[in-house]
Amino acid sequence: EPRVTCTIPAESAEGFEVLTLEGLSDEERVLFSDSFVASGAVQCGFCTPGMLMTAVSLLDENPSPSEEEVRCAISGNLCRCTGYQHIVEAVLSVAEKR
Ligand code: FES
């Protein structure tokens, strides 16, 4: 389950498995990063790790989400740069390619 880690004290993760971008396979990391770059979903990059991990969780649960489901899934992640549309398009692109 994705978590907004900037609001969670690190010690509260003790005993839990934590998956970050570095824990994804090379193939999966390249698929997501290529789709985000191709869609223009990365600008400053500050939100990108959270967006990607939220997308991974969503697509693991729902391999063919609607645009509305993607918007709902990423709604807890703030992006100051992209206006979200490009991120939604990137996630839908990954869903098609997966
Ligand atoms: Fe800058 Fe999302 S790309 S905050």
Image (spheres, helix red, strand yellow):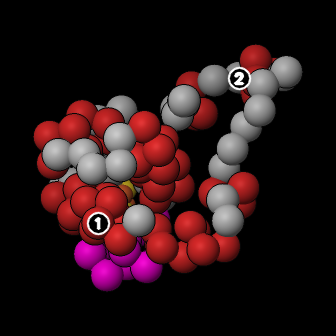
Q: Where's residue 80, x and y in %?
A: 29, 53
Q: Is residue 37 magenta?
A: yes
Q: Which residues are magenta?
A: 34-45
Quadrant in which the N terminus appears: top right
Q: Is residue 97 left or right of residue 72?
A: right
3 with respect to 63 (left or right): right
Instruction: Locate residue 28, reporting x and y percent.
Output: 56, 67
Question: Ligand 1 is located in which of the four quadrants?
Answer: bottom left
Instruction: Indicate the secondary structure of the residue bearing disc 1.
Output: helix
Residue wearing tag 2: 9
The kind of residue on which mark 1 rests is Glu
Q: Quadrant of residue 34?
A: bottom left
Q: Which residue, as the protein is rendered here, is positioned at the far top?
A: 12
Per the image, is 8 magenta? no
Q: Which mark is residue 96?
A: 1
Give whichever of 32, 63 is nearer the camera.
63
Residue 10 makes an appearance in the image: yes
State whether residue 42 appears in this view: no
Q: Is residue 19 left or right of residue 83?
A: right
Q: Residue at x 66, y 59 (%)?
A: 24
Q: State which tag comes first along the sequence, 2 or 1.
A: 2
Q: Nearer the viewer, residue 20 or 5?
A: 20
Q: Amino acid at mark 2?
A: Pro
Image quarter for residue 88? bottom left
Q: Which mark is residue 39?
A: none
